[in-house]
Each structure stands twice: as structure tokens, then as C-alpha cells.
Amino acid sequence: MANGDYLTFEELMKYSEALEKIKGEVASFVADEGLDFAYNVRGWPSILIRWKNANSLKCTLQLYMNVDKATFTLWVAVSKDLDTGRYTFTKKINEVLKTPFDAQSLLEEMKDGLKLCNSIKFEDLTLSK
């Protein structure tokens, strides 16, 4: 995934069309969960949801366009920063999502990712190298 504005505005709009079509459903889903989301972070087609779970761990659920520009990846990450380092858990839920998205299937995968993140405890994390 790109870390900053590698697409022109026109390219961003073109590659974000599939996200635009599901944006309303995602907004409704995150609102139901009491969360917020960011869209097209750093100028790359993506949906980013962040929150803290009941165990005070930072959680991320992200759908982003792969560098092939033909598929998207849905992944989750959970982390905790301590003086001894960053402890993390990551998992790709689906790394070859093709457009147009089946909104219902994608939302179910996002809900599964949210449940997974919310189930993670500090003991499930590993120290990042």
C-alpha cells in the first residue's frame, strides 16, 4: 500500500469508484458500532476504521487497494505500545477482493474483522522486531 499521494486526483477518483458504491453501507455499519472511519487516507483508495477494544488495545480494520490496482485487501491489526516495544497482532481477512464489491459479503467480512479485533487480549500480541 502506498504511504502518500502516488495517484493523481483523477486516478484516485477512478480507483475509488468501487469504494464510493459501498461508502454508505460502511458508514451505517461503523455508526451502528459507534466508530468513525476515514476514506482514501494519504490519497490512496481505502477505508480505515480505528478504535480501542475493551482491553485498551489499538485496533485497525482497513480495506485498501493493492498496488496491482485490480484488487483490494481487507486486514486487521491490534497493537499496544509499551516501554519494552510495540506488541502486535495482524491478519489479512481477504487479500484478493475484486470490484465491484458484493457489499453484503464485504460487510460480513468487516464485521468478522471487528469481532476478531475486539476478542484480542494483550496475551495474543507478539513483540514486533
Image: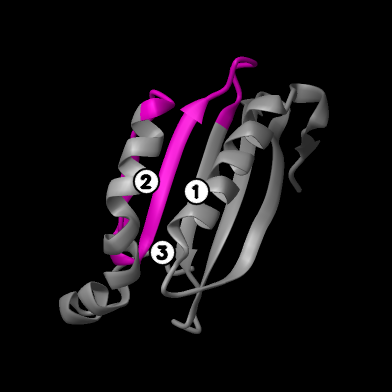
- Which residue matches tag 1? 107
Tell me which label, 3 or 1, sits earlier in the chain: 3
User: What is the C-alpha distance between the residues marked 2 and 3?
Assistant: 23 Å
- Left or right: residue 34 versus residue 126 is left
- Which residue matches tag 2? 26
Please name the amino acid that badge 1 sits on: Leu
Residue in the foreground of this view, choosing between 6 and 31: 31
Q: Residue at x 45, y 36 (%)?
A: 50
Please name the amino acid that badge 3 sits on: Asn
Badge 3 element: loop
**Percent coordinates x, y for residue 106 in the rendering:** 51, 55
Q: Which residues, given as a range, are shown in magenta? A: 32-58
- Which residue matches tag 3? 3
Please name the amino acid that badge 2 sits on: Val
Badge 1 element: helix
Residue in the foreground of this view, choosing between 93 and 99: 99
Label 2 neighbourhood size at 10 Å, few (<14), some (14-19), many (20+)? Answer: many
Badge 2 element: helix
**Percent coordinates x, y for residue 91 in the rendering:** 70, 51
Q: Residue at x 34, y 47 (%)?
A: 25
Residue in the foreground of this view, choosing between 47 and 97: 97
Q: Is residue 90 above or below residue 123?
A: below
